[in-house]
Image: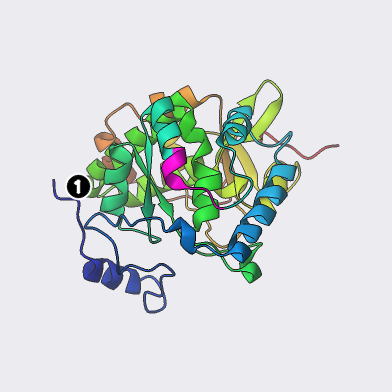
């Protein structure tokens, strides 16, 4: 299967979704699979200082909120002092779970993204946000990708889930299930919550790299829903990209994610064609809000 995508075709596709395909990254020096070299020496001291500020802000928010697997891996990665060298972390990651990091210029085509995941390669953007984007950024940058995503790739079960997701993505592209499968990634890998003996904790990278949503997503009594993950329900649920989530799906373990993606999704995609999509803030009659407002 040819998983290379021409830059011209990719930018033409992005142009239909954004203002003139105004992607932030530099796509001039990449291979056919959108991989570039991380020019670590090109980062400025100002960028390293911005990384340190972002890192320290998030680190202060993690205790009592992030899942322990994430916190433990982050400590071992030793990435607090500046933008990390991908090659160093990649070697450590490969020794732990067989994954590697590949540097990419920014957003990449879905086919290429799924192929990387299916082969245990995680794409990490090379550029860092600007100081004025400290609290919010539209496109994922190196801080979101590295700080938010890479730590849990050291967890064997979660790492296997990400690979299985990539394999499922390649299949979904042939079956017309891409929109549905994208919702699973959004609500688990990016914005997922997990039950632990200590209470509900965060494992989603989109939350863990956010200054405000880390606290918001675990606050009882907000307008957002917190419900147990059901794969079919998740695949039907729309999401918002420009606000805090209106629904958070809660899992009981990473094994639940891995097992949930084991079945063939072909009949599920067919079934979903005949079901309405659900608004992002839906709470179905049988569902229980897991973080009810305090009395």
At x 40%, y 55%, the residue is 38
84 inside magenta stretch:
yes
Taking the magenta stretch, the answer to whether it contains residue 184 is no
From the top left corner, tell me how far across and down residue 244 is, in percent: 62, 55
Q: Which residue is mark 1?
A: 174
Count of residue discs: 1
Residue span colored magenta: 83-89
> Quadrant of the image for the C terminus?
top right
Expressed as whole percent of the image width and height from the top left, the position of residue 120 reads 33, 36
Is residue 64 visible in the rendered image? The answer is yes
Query: In this view of the protein, which residue sits in the foreground, 42 or 157?
Result: 42
Q: Residue furthest bottom?
A: 20
Q: Is residue 208 above or below residue 137?
A: above
Looking at this view, is 143 or 248 the one in front?
Answer: 143
Local crowd size for mark 1, using a 10 Å CA cut-off: few (<14), some (14–19), many (≥20): few
Q: Position of residue 152 (x, y in %)?
A: 51, 34
| Residue at image location 35% in from the left, 56% down from the top | 37
Residue occupying image coordinates x 55% and y 45%: 148
């Amino acid at each position: 299967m040819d998983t290379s995508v021409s830059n011209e075709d990719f930018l033409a596709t992005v142009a239909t979704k954004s203002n003139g395909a105004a992607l932030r990254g530099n796509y001039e020096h990449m291979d056919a699979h959108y991989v570039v070299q991380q020019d670590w020496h090109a980062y400025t001291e100002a960028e390293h200082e911005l990384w340190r500020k972002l890192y320290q802000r998030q680190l202060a928010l993690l205790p009592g909120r992030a899942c322990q697997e994430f916190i433990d891996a982050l400590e071992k990665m030793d990435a607090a002092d500046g933008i990390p060298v991908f090659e160093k972390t990649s070697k450590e990651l490969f020794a732990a779970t067989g994954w590697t990091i590949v540097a990419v210029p920014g957003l990449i085509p879905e086919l290429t993204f799924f192929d990387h995941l299916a082969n245990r390669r995680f794409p990490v953007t090379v550029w860092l946000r600007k100081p004025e984007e400290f609290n919010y950024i539209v496109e994922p940058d190196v801080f979101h990708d590295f700080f938010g995503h890479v730590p849990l790739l050291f967890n064997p079960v979660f790492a296997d889930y990400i690979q299985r997701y990539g394999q499922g993505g390649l299949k979904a592209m042939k079956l017309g299930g891409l929109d549905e499968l994208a919702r699973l990634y959004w609500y688990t890998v990016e914005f997922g919550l997990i039950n632990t003996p200590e209470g509900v904790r965060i494992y989603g990278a989109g939350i863990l790299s956010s200054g405000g949503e880390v606290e918001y997503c675990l606050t009882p009594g907000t307008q957002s829903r917190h419900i147990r993950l059901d794969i079919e329900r998740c695949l039907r649920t729309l999401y918002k990209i420009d606000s805090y989530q209106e629904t958070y799906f809660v899992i009981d373990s990473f094994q639940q994610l891995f097992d949930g993606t084991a079945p063939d999704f072909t009949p599920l995609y067919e079934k979903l064609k005949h079901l309405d999509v659900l608004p992002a803030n839906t709470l179905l009659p049988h569902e229980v809000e897991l973080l009810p407002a305090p009395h």
